[in-house]
Image: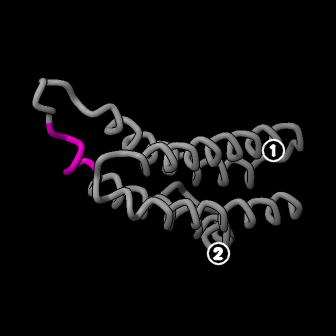
């Protein structure tokens, strides 16, 4: 995944953690999709499959927000990117909790993703103080 990074950005711990979260969420989503992708006996689908796509989409949006905040010069605009990161992280965390209640063996990996999100939040807090 290449977002035309400034050279220093790829060394930031928060950016590295965002990339780890992307890879982990994609792997978990793929695993969940195998279990949740089938139709039930009554012909309906499992609604939890949509949350598995949401975790991928939300995690993929973390890195661009970090890049945008790093590039921004105006502090008001930086804060908008910080708020967006907060919302994405919060939604991602909540979707992980929802998926943990799903009927899939992949739900066993979601606490690992939530743990990585908690570490990301700590890094995010320190990173925000430096900008």
Viewport quadrant of the C terminus? bottom right
When the figure is inspected, residue 118 is found, relative to residue 78, above or below; the finding is below
Q: Position of residue 18 (x, y in %)?
A: 57, 61
Element under disc 1:
helix
When the figure is inspected, residue 22 is found, relative to residue 48, above or below; the finding is below
Q: Is residue 5 left or right of residue 122?
A: left
Where residue 53 sits, quadrant-wise, is: top left
Where residue 107 sits, quadrant-wise, is: bottom left
Q: Residue furthest top?
A: 43
Q: Which mark is residue 61?
A: none
Q: In this view of the protein, which residue sits in the foreground, 49 or 8? A: 49
Where residue 49 sits, quadrant-wise, is: top left
Check disc 2 and report the residue beneath it.
Answer: 11
- Inter-mark Cα distance, 2 to 1: 20 Å
Q: Is residue 108 left or right of residue 74?
A: left
Q: Earlier in the sequence, mark 2 or mark 1?
A: 2
Q: Position of residue 55 (x, y in %)?
A: 46, 46
Q: Is residue 50 left or right of residue 69?
A: left
Q: Position of residue 15 (x, y in %)?
A: 62, 64
Q: In this view of the protein, which residue sits in the foreground, 53 or 44? A: 44
What segment carries the magenta color? 32-38
Element under disc 2:
helix
Q: Which mark is residue 78?
A: 1
Q: Residue at x 89, y 44 (%)?
A: 75
Q: Position of residue 34 (x, y in %)?
A: 19, 51
Q: Residue at x 75, y 65 (%)?
A: 122
Viewport quadrant of the N terminus? bottom left
């Amino acid at each position: 995944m290449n977002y035309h990074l400034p050279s220093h950005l790829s060394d930031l711990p928060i950016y590295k953690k965002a990339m780890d979260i992307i890879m982990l969420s994609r792997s978990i989503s793929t695993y969940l999709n195998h279990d949740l992708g089938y139709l039930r006996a009554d012909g309906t689908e499992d609604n939890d499959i949509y949350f598995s796509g949401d975790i991928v989409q939300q995690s993929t949006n973390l890195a661009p927000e970090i890049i945008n905040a790093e590039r921004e010069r105006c502090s008001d605009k930086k804060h908008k990117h910080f708020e967006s990161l907060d919302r994405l992280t919060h939604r991602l965390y909540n979707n992980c909790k929802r998926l943990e209640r799903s009927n899939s063996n992949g739900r066993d990996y979601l606490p690992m993703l939530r743990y990585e999100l908690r570490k990301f939040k700590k890094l995010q807090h320190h990173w925000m103080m430096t900008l």
